Amino acid sequence: MAKVELQDVRKSFGTHEVIKGIDLEIPDGAFCVFVGPSGCGKSTLLRMIAGLEHTTAGTIMIGGKDVTIVQPAKRGVAMVFQSYALYPNMTVAENITFGLRMTNQSKATTEKKLSDAALILKLDRLLDRKPAQLSGGQRQRVAIGRAIVREPGVFLFDEPLSNLDAALRVEMRTEISRLHAELDSTMIYVTHDQIEAMTMADVIVVLNAGRIEQVGSPLELYHNPNSLFVAQFMGSPKMNTFAVELSDYGHRKTKVDLPNGGFIVVDGSERLSGPAVLGVRPEHITIDTKGELKGEVVLSERLGPETMLHVDVGETEPVIVKEDGLNKLSRGDQCALKIEADACHLFASEGQTIRSGSLLD
Amino acid sequence: MFPTPIENSSSLIRIGYKVILPIALFLWLLPLLGIAFTSIRPAADLDAGNYFGWPSNFAGVENYTSVFTRSNIGYYILNSFKVTIPTVIGTLILSTLAGYALAIYNFRSNLIIFFLFVAGNFVPFQILAIPVRDLSIDMGLYDTSIGLIMFHIAFQTGFCTLFMRNFIKALPVVLIESARVEGVNDWKIFYYIVLPLVRPAIAALAVLVFTFIWNDFFWATIMSQSVSVRPITAGISELKGQWKAAWELIAAASIIAALPPVAMFFMMQKHFIAGLTLGATKG
């Protein structure tokens, strides 16, 4: 258990700066997820915390100690890699205990830790197998086992589930969450999958081009994004956006002109006029004959419990509407869309939020 | 399927294949067959000009025994082992360590050193013959096994380092990073993780270097003179005799000399298994 603090952390490869000044405090015992598109620096940041990448500037503190130039092994961290990194020439048991054996731990403690870890991860029947004889999920569990026996203050996960198939990913997701509850350690988890971030995290850190875009709880980021980037990154299918024109409607209300002639009125916008981007999530648009937007269904994705309707309203991209699974509309049907005004986000053309459509209390 | 199985090809190609293959095989093996037949021919056949015909009688036993009785070939075989085995071991140790360092560590002159190893391979041995001989005489290493071993190691390490460096570079680097995070020191990472994974490369190099050093004639003739140092390749010439070359004996000795590299290949064969890193990462 340990708190992790980053103070103005920077990293350059040659003249190319990839981490551009990160300030972050991850509380003791938190499950923190770094999320962002590929190339945003999330893995690099994790590797810097692990000590596998040199930190160009700034300070990294783990458990109150400055570890910026400390060797990886002495930082009290354990890392689980995307590609598992199992030693192919060793059995599961040898893999899990390798670090302990190499650092001269007593045989009794090694055995004890091995059996504890095997029990937690349900690996007890597989201890004599070689990695090549394991399935993807089992390999990942061995990799996690290797981290557990080190009893680290901080667990670091580098996209650990992205090599697994979809069903196994869901299973391992719950397993890692359970592990977090059981071990009560700080965990830092890197992923590009916003569903993993939403489901597992206490704290999500959204990174973009080497900078922190926003830090917050999953629901806070979902409902109260402070930029268009975060709004579009969190949520699947992603938020619908329209280029709109704002005008003053009086009484501190703003009139939002929609692309094809209709308009809606919202309150609480920081700007009352000028160009802006309207963002609204698929679940906040409904099919309604009195709707402001007219369009034609171009695709309906039937997921079972719900159906995603892609409706062409004359913009470059179709609007995605989340409807009931029993909805009968299909390709070619005409419909009108009603936008829930309270749930509308408005963003300035530079990207920052000027009205939050948060429905949280 | 690629290549298309021969059974599925047109009949012309099938017949051509069946005719040409044995001919090509025979031509390719002809020198070897020639040596093998000569080694069992009685000397009289060669005197009578029967070089390529059927041997008049089987003289294999006499020929092979007289190779040992009429020359120092026993010594020469021993000398060859005395030079070859330490060279193989020395080269493999040096090149595996150097390859590991060049593949894993990012130090400033890494690439320059690596290119030096590569560039060394482009220097023709023949150019070096006289300087190396002079140097070995100055160092008191001329006509000693240790001298041959040292120069062989020096010449072989370049290529082997290139080979090992590239092989280790192809291993998943996360294995080493993972061990580092676990607090395993570099010597242990080398010994417990890298070494088991480069076993196929070591086996391949062992066979290659063994064969190369065993068959070396150039340095053997330049660097050695006495019976107690001369390797078998240089020693065979002793059978040439003063007035008449005993070709049947030279052939028999050549066959004997060729056996150890073949044995070495079969010994190392089981280590050439592919797919040792299977299961380390997403396969």
Image (tube, rainbow, N blue to C red):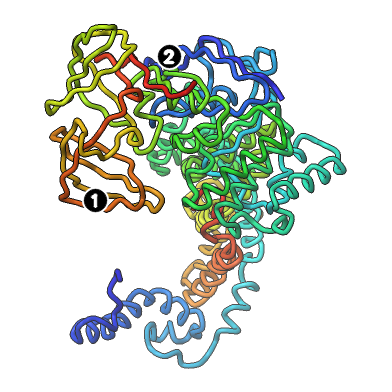
Task: Examine the image and state in which quarter residue B126 appears.
Answer: top left
Q: Residue furthest bottom?
A: B56
**Residue labelled with disc 2:** A20
Question: Residue B165, percent across and down?
Answer: 50, 40
Number of disc labels = 2
Task: Examine the image and state in which quarter residue A26 appears.
Answer: top right
- Front residue (pair B150, A101): A101
The residue shown at (52%, 12%) is: A23
Chain at numbered mark 1: A
How packed mark 2 is, by other alpha carbons closer than 10 Å (few <14, some 14-19, many 20 or more), is some
**Residue labelled with disc 1:** A329
Q: Earlier in the sequence, mark 1 or mark 2?
A: 2
- Secondary structure beneath dot 2 equals strand
- Front residue (pair A253, B247): A253
Question: Residue A95, percent across and down?
Answer: 68, 47
Q: Where residue A347 is drawn, which disc sits there?
A: none
Q: Which quadrant does the N terminus of chain B fall into? A: bottom left
Which of label 1 and label 2 is nearer to you? 1
